[in-house]
Amino acid sequence: MSETIVKHLNFGLEAKSKIFEGIEKLTKAVSSTLGASGQCVIMEDSSGNPQITKDGVTVANSIILLDPVENMGSKLLKEAARKTVTEAGDGTTTATVLAHAILRSAYKELENSTPRQI
């Protein structure tokens, strides 16, 4: 029988809340670049140099949240952005904002449900 090592164990409302917090944080940064009046984001590249971009997927990929459970939530949206750029070549910021809206709606339903309803 093999042994599984678990680095982080979260469940229930605490896990759902932290995952959604990660989704919120990533969406806030990425959505600031949306549209013609979107803003540039400045971040540090792997060499420590400043990088300025208005590209949603670049912003998303640069974000690593310190809380591991929140970071899992942000990874959900990063995957949506990556798939969008692979399939369509553009629209990553819009995909991130739409995925956030869908997940926010699902999260609200989970908050209002009893365990038997899920």
Image (tube, grey):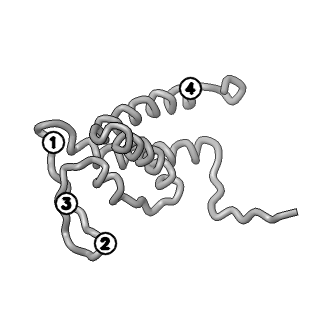
The numbered mark at residue 42 is 3
Give the Cα distance between marks 3 and 4.
38 Å
The answer to whether the residue labelled 2 contacts the one labelled 4, judged by CB atoms less than 8 Å apart, is no
Mark 2 vs mark 4, foreground winner is 2
Mark 1 vs mark 2, foreground winner is 2
Give the residue displayed 67% in from the left and 23% down from the top. 117
Mark sitting earlier along the chain (3/4): 3
Determine whether the residue tagged by mark 4 lies in a helix, strand or loop: loop
Q: Amino acid at mark 3?
A: Ile
Specify the farthest residue to the bottom: 47
Residue where numbered disc 4 is placed: 112
Give the Cα distance between marks 1 and 3.
13 Å
Q: Quadrant of the C terminus?
A: top right
Depth order, front residue of 26/80: 80
Mark 1 vs mark 4, foreground winner is 1
Give the residue displayed 26% in from the left and 41% down from the top. 31
Q: Quadrant of the N terminus?
A: bottom right
Give the Cα distance between marks 2 and 3.
13 Å
Depth order, front residue of 9/72: 72
Q: Quadrant of residue 101?
A: top left
Give the residue displayed 28% in from the left and 49% down from the top. 29
Specify the farthest residue to the right: 1
The answer to whether the residue labelled 3 contacts the one labelled 4, judged by CB atoms less than 8 Å apart, is no
Depth order, front residue of 113/54: 54
Residue where numbered disc 2 is placed: 46
The answer to whether the residue labelled 1 contacts the one labelled 4, judged by CB atoms less than 8 Å apart, is no
